[in-house]
Image (cartoon, rainbow, N blue to C red):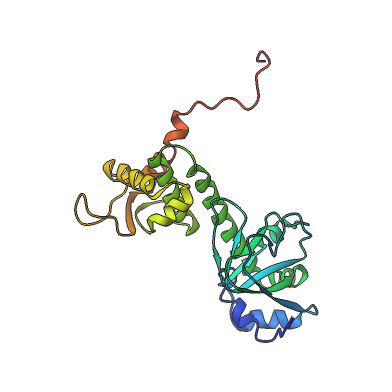
Amino acid sequence: MSVRVSGFAKGLVRCLDFAPVSVEELDRVLIGAAETLEMDYIEPSADSPFIRSGASFADLVFVQHGTAVPWQSPHSELDAPFLIGVHEFLMDAERWVASYSAITEAVVVRIPKVVMARVVDELPSVRERMHELVMRRLARYYWVSLATSGAPGSRVAAALVSRLALEDRDFGVDRRIAVRQTDIARLTTMSRSGVSVGLAELAREQVVQWGDRPGARFRGEVLVPDVDLLKDYAFLDMRTREIRPLLAGDGDE
């Protein structure tokens, strides 16, 4: 189904990538594009992704309604409004890197690459914002990779840093993080009891705090007195683990 371009900017500008521009600016650029935008209704499915890794990358996909997930572990839930394909677009990729499925009924709008190229050419602040968000997400993936192996304390620490990285707050002091135990369990691939052990260890070492008194029940928010200390704890396993050289020396077999 073709989308009526005039007025579509009102929905698209809700996406974080377009925060620097006004509805009027974006609407003007979209109206000037000759290409049409296509809207699709996507049913939730774990077997049939609406974006397939390796398929030709011709359009960015705007999730206007519903929730999509990339096929990765731990998974991320991309709630509307969300623009998929920014990384591929910025890298001028010819094919999709990942596969995506809808986990709820979803409505998506496919935006041709040439249309998005026109947008970032006429509105340079959009490209700058896209770069900023991609770097935040890459930082988050880096910390999540540390959260999936090692001892509970270091894994929980890495998961907490990942939340700060996504908001560009993974530095400084006195950072508050609103997070549920189930979210930490998903990021670390641990059980809730394992997450409890990790949180207790971090509290005991005064890496994080919650509540008004020692022994208070965790209620979904932690205070990080020093982010560098939290990062040091996330690196604990890396520092104690023997890392073999990737390339052997001339005398090694």
Give the residue at x 49% y 39%.
149
Where 209 falls versus 249 (above or below)?
below
Q: Locate the N terminus by quadrant.
A: bottom right
On the image, the x and y values in percent for residue 204 come to 27, 42
In depth, the one of 120 and 211 nearer the eye is: 211
182 relative to 89 in the view: left or right: left
On the image, the x and y values in percent for residue 236 come to 42, 35
In depth, the one of 24 and 191 nearer the eye is: 191
168 relative to 126 in the view: left or right: left
Q: Locate the C terminus by quadrant.
A: top right
Give the residue at x 65% y 15%.
252
On the image, the x and y values in percent for residue 20 come to 57, 72
In depth, the one of 161 and 96 nearer the eye is: 96
Where 14 falls versus 148 (above or below)?
below
In depth, the one of 47 and 168 nearer the eye is: 47
On the image, the x and y values in percent for residue 179 come to 39, 58
Give the residue at x 42% y 51%.
160
Q: Residue furthest top?
A: 251
Give residue 120's quadrant in the image. Answer: bottom right
